[in-house]
Amino acid sequence: MCNVCMPISEEAHATDKFADQLLDMLNQGALSLMVSIGHRTGLFDCLAELASPTCEQLATHAGLDQRYVKEWLGAMVTGSVVKYLPATDEYELPGSHAALLTRSASPDNIAVFAQYIGILGQVEDKIVDCFRHGGGVGYEHYPRFHEVMAEDSGQTVLAGLDEHILPLIGHIIPQLEAGIRVLDVGCGKGRVLLQLASRYPKSRFTGNDLSTEALAEARQQAVIAGLGNIQFEVRDLSDFEHTAEPEGFDFVTAFDAVHDQAVPQSVLNGIYRTLRVSGTFLMQDIRASSRLENNLEHPIAPLLYTLSTMHCMTVSLAQDGAGLGTMWGEELAQEMLLEAGFETIDVHLLDHDFQNNFYVMRKDA
């Protein structure tokens, strides 16, 4: 039988299929960078505002260099993100796409998350060195990470804080209105605390974080807003179980922060210690399993494991920490919360947020 007529082997078919997968991966990775640029430069917003502009009109409206805009549009059109109308040399962002790519689409703006790809790419050389020699990459090597995290939090936490998240704790809103002490662990730029401090003036709020740059901006925003009931402290929480103020707070929060810590068990122990009796701890963290085989159908598992490798795990290891990583999972999280002293752990899922779990615990007498 001639070679042309021979059936393709199963292995060869599998190789061809995987080759297509890899090519698609390269294209989608490249598009992620272009989507990030489209978000940062405001091009998606301008496309939505202008309906069907030419490249020149779009560049002028956005205040950008036309040659770069033209090449960016080439990526967007061939990537099926933007439509091209060759008869009029115009470009169109379909409404169904604008609903996921523009600032007005928040909290559904996926372009916000695309920014992580470029940020992580900046530390690839350092991560490769860690693969070879161990250790980690410190927070100081991620200059835009807190900025993007704040924008991310604005969509996942701030957008649902009043309507969805706080109501998970039936008693907390009346307490905040009456006046209690609140601590946010790993507060970053403090956007959650700033919103709470503005809404509940009788309560007092404290934010802790390791980043001096993030807290400097948080303090500036507090001054601009005229908030006298909030303070931000630069603090290494590695020894928090021994340094936490005993029974100092009625309500403690940790939004996507515990798994980054150098000594996360000490942080959780400290949170338990600093809660007053009947006080409440609210922890938001990634919805995933501690077991790899249970994450095979997770819709963004590859992205989360990448974020873990190139940020969450490595920043902890840079402090000689535990390196839990983003995907530490529900099982381990509950084990550590129990070890900290929390006897009852309620895990909540929100309909609008497939990415996170919300753990609610009270400190028993």
Image (spheres, grey):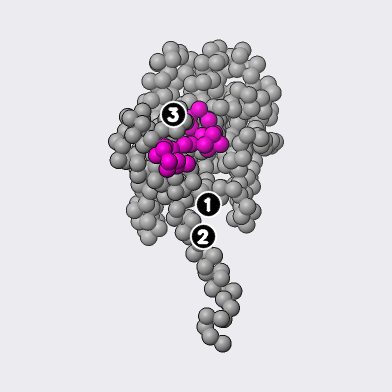
For marks 2 and 1, the one nearer the N-term is: 2
Indicate left or right for 289 with 255 as reference: right
User: Residue at 39% of width from left, 46% of height from top?
Assistant: 74
In this view, the mark in front (1 or 3): 3
Q: Secondary structure at mark 3?
A: helix
Q: Is residue 123 above or below residue 223?
A: below
* Residue identifier under label 2: 21
**Which quadrant would the C terminus be assigned to in this image?**
top right
In this view, the mark in front (2 or 1): 2
Q: CA distance from mark 2 to mark 3?
A: 35 Å
User: Residue at 33% of width from left, 34% of height from top?
Assistant: 56
Indicate left or right for 127 with 305 as reference: left
Segment colored magenta: 83-106
User: Residue at 56% of width from left, 70% of height from top?
Assistant: 13
Q: CA distance from mark 2 to mark 1?
A: 14 Å
Q: Nearer the viewer, residue 226 or 362?
A: 226
For marks 2 and 3, the one nearer the N-term is: 2
* Residue identifier under label 3: 50
* Residue identifier under label 1: 302
| Residue count near mark 2 (Cα–Cα under 10 Å), binned few <14, some 14–19, many ≥20 | few
Q: Secondary structure at mark 1?
A: helix
Is 84 one of the magenta-colored residues?
yes
Q: Position of residue 161 (x, y in %)?
A: 58, 26
Q: Position of residue 24 (x, y in %)?
A: 49, 56
Q: Amino acid at mark 1?
A: Pro
Q: Amino acid at mark 3?
A: Leu
Q: Is residue 29 above or below residue 63?
A: below
Q: Position of residue 357 (x, y in %)?
A: 62, 38
